[in-house]
Image (spheres, rainbow, N blue to C red):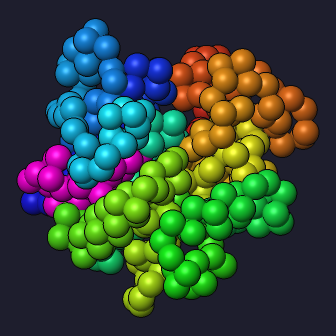
Amino acid sequence: MTKRIIVSAANEGYYPLLSDLISSIEDGKGDADVAIGVLDVGLSGAQRAALSARVQHVVAPDWDYRFSASGSTPQKFRAMTARPHLPKHFPGYDIIMWMDADAWIQQWSAVEHFFTQAASRGLAVCQEMDRSYGNVYNLNNSRQLFFASLKAFGDEALQHVAWMPMINSGVFAMHADCHYWSEWRDILGAAIQRGHLDHFTEQTALNVCVYRRLPLPCFMPARFNWVCVHAIPMFDERTQLYVEPTAPHDAVSVVHLAGVQTRIQNFGGVSDLTGNKTTMNLMYCQWKEYRDQVRSSWTGATQPQPQS
């Protein structure tokens, strides 16, 4: 039987987001046999104890690379240096799915698609590319940040990868035996030894790894990792689901709260399909509370049922 695990990471400040992600896994997976693992990169003792009652593994990684600036580098960066080493930190699993702590699952079916494609193609991952995304039209600085990060990997990588759609490493699934793990480790390690480690280095290293040769992995649709900094989803009052902001408003499967403004508790930027502002703030806990209130108010079978 294939052993599967979903892994994330958090420090003390990210714990509320991580707790939300875990709740979405617990509520969504039903009887699916999927373990949960957490990289502890600065949790408090109380937080770690609370997690131990909810997940199968809590691992405190050391720096997975030796480099001179490790003493002054923020400890939360261990989540990034550990990411290409997940098979080492969580041995015994056939397929490892990574989800950033600021992501959560609205439709579990997407997770199963990630696992299935990783089993057959090695890696299943999303590109930051959708007709609704601001970066496609150069409406944010995403391209500039990607281009600047690529400079750490040399002229060849810059010329070959700069115009490719950026791959987002915040949500992906990879088979434990996939060749991308070792290649990703080596490419990231070389960049770190050259003195490059920031918020984008690890993700850019994956881009260089994937785009440098064929065949390409399985690229999943953007709604399987909806990056909110590029486009805020809308809220469908009929189904109680976050949906793509462009017609026909397909449901978003994984909500990724990338971008500081979307992580704020009192964020009020979600519109419904009529264009009116709602009280929704994109957090899983609030979405679940609202959905449950709506469901409890239903009095007849004629009311539409939200998708699972």
Q: Quadrant of residue 306?
A: top right
Name the foreground residue: 100 vs 204: 204
Image quadrant holding the N terminus, namely bottom left
Q: Is residue 174 visible?
A: no
Q: Is residue 287 magenta?
A: no
Residue drawn at point x = 47 percent, y = 21 percent: 13
The spot of residue 199 in percent (x, y) is 52, 47
- Relative horizontal placement of residue 211, taking residue 145 as reference (left or right): left
Q: Looking at this rendering, what residue extends furthest in the front direction?
A: 68
Left or right, 199 with reference to 266: left
Q: Determine if residue 21 is in view.
A: yes
The residue furthest top is 46
Q: Which residues are magenta?
A: 79-99
> Seen from this angle, which residue lies furthest bottom?
214
Is residue 184 depicted above or below 86 in this figure? Answer: below
Looking at the picture, tell me which residue is in the foreground, 263 or 110. 263
Task: Locate residue 184, reporting x and y percent.
Answer: 33, 67
Query: Can you say whether 206 is above or below 283 in the image?
Result: below
Q: Image point 25% across, 43% down: which residue?
A: 63
Residue 62 placement (x, y as % from top left)? 21, 39
The residue located at (54%, 29%) in the rendering is 284
